[in-house]
Image (cartoon, rainbow, N blue to C red):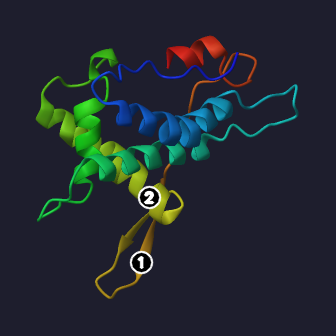
Amino acid sequence: MGYVPLKINASRWPHAEQFIRQTLEDMYFRDVHAMLRLPSEAAGIAAGCNFAITHVLLAAVAGISTSLYAPRKVEPYGGPFVDVLLDFYPWELERDVPSIRNDRCKLVKETLYEELRGPLVHHLGLNIRKCRGGGQIVEPGHVVKIKRLTMPSGDGLSEDIIEEL
């Protein structure tokens, strides 16, 4: 079974459906779907594409955020990125996530934007900070590590689990 298209009620916004189908689904979600099936011992593919999946999903959120939200005059770093996740992520499906918007904002900004997106996009997953003299320091021992679910066999996720996600 292949990728299952998103269920969209486009009666009010037909252009939104076209954007979602042609941009998000065709260019992002179908690739992520395929990568979630990895690794595959039968196909001789040992890589799980964890970093690639994370990059693609973070890029999709960043692209959606700059497409949907006009830049503000005084833009805090990650403002639109955080806003799109606060406004559209299905928080009700998460366990142990604060229900208060300000707490969610802090969680998204500190975890997804500052600890994950920034280091992966700009520094190959290393925690690099700027020095006063203009150089950069790599802080030892702080590297982004991405883990994800796999099947007990070590293969990628089943179609049922991917569809549930």
- In this image, 146 relative to 75: left or right? right
Image-quadrant location for residue 98: top left
Q: Is residue 22 above or below residue 59?
A: above
- In this image, 15 relative to 1: left or right? left
- Is residue 75 among what the camera can see? yes
Q: Work out how far the residue at label 2 is from the one at label 1, CA to CA, in angstroms.
A: 13 Å
Residue at x 25% of width, y 38% of height: 107
Extreme top residue here? 160
Q: x, y percentage for residue 135?
A: 40, 83
Circle nearer the viewer, 2 or 1: 2
Q: x, y percentage for residue 130?
A: 35, 75
Query: What is the number of the mark on residue 136?
Result: 1
Q: Is residue 54 above or below residue 7?
A: below
Element at label 1: strand
Q: Nearer the viewer, residue 69 or 14?
A: 14
Q: Which residue is mark 2?
A: 119
Residue at x 32% of width, y 88% of height: 133
Image-quadrant location for residue 104: top left
Q: x, y percentage for residue 114?
A: 33, 53
Residue at x 31% of width, y 29% of height: 89
Q: Nearer the viewer, residue 11 or 69?
A: 11
Query: What is the number of the mark on residue 41?
Result: none
The amino acid beneath tag 1 is: Gln
- Is residue 126 among what the camera can see? no
Element at label 2: helix
Q: Quadrant of the N terminus?
A: top right
Q: Is residue 56 above or below residue 131?
A: above
The amino acid beneath tag 2 is: Pro
Q: x, y percentage for residue 31?
A: 63, 38
Instruction: Give whichever of discs 2 and 1 has the lower sequence position.
Output: 2
